Image (cartoon, grey):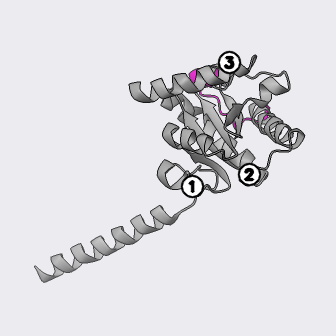
Amino acid sequence: MYIMRKRLLISFIVMSFLLILTACGDSGNAAKDDAQSTADNPEVGLNKITLDALVQKKENNEAFYVLMFDAKKEYVKNTKLIDAYNKALKERDMKAYYINLHDLSYDRNQKLKSLREAFDNKNSGHSPFADGGMTVVHHGKISSPFAYFGKAWLLNTTIGEKGNNDESFLKKSIYKDVKEGIQLSLDYVNENKIDMSK
């Protein structure tokens, strides 16, 4: 009986140690997924944000980058979309948020609708809400660098296509497009002299 208890205790200690090691591990490309803690303290790379936090930051006239998309969770996971943007942002030492508009509740969709209407009244061409992509939030507005430069990338459509084929955004040809989208955001900020530290 004593030997059995001792084995159980040792097994428990070993399992606890392994769980702690697993929890402390860093996958390198994994984006931070805790929307509560990242809204105010984003890390370099891609950080999850809620719609409420995004709206609050916009209303506070904060300046930040956000990746918007509308896609099934399994497509996002299978295509390694988050990993690709996280990696590209880390290469640039940039901080950005991301939000998947796909599974918003009815209340959140109403809030999104008013955001969308405000955006669509002032812009034409590329819409981060309808098309997906990197955007720059500043001075209380949401701006699409794609629309500003007269370019478009239908990210939501691309996620669907790549998701159906289990194709990764880390693949060289697609990853190049990810980096170009980030560069457009940087160019937009530089051309418009936007202070992103606020």
Residue position for label 1:
40
Q: Return the residue nearer the eye: 88 or 112.
A: 112
Which label belongs to residue 189?
none
Dot 2: element? loop
Q: How many marks?
A: 3
Q: Earlier in the sequence, mark 2 or mark 3?
A: 2
Q: CA distance from mark 1 to mark 2?
A: 15 Å
Dot 3: element? helix
Q: Label 1 sits on what residue type? A: Asp
Q: Quadrant of the N terminus?
A: bottom left
Q: CA distance from mark 1 to mark 3?
A: 29 Å
Lateral position of residue 149 relative to residue 66, left or right: right
Residue position for label 2:
94
Lateral position of residue 157 relative to residue 114, left or right: right
Residue 69 falls in which quadrant of the image?
top right
> Residue 165, percent across and down?
60, 22
Residue position for label 3:
121
* Label 1–label 3 contact, CB within 8 A: no
Q: Label 2 sits on what residue type? A: Met
Q: CA distance from mark 2 to mark 3?
A: 29 Å
**Residue 44 in view (yes/no):** yes
Q: Return the residue nearer the eye: 55 or 12.
A: 55
Residue 159 on the magenta segment: yes
The 10 Å Cα crowd at callout 2, few under 14, some 14 to 19, many 20 or more, is: some
> Residue 160, percent across and down?
59, 21
Segment tinted magenta in the rendering: 158-173
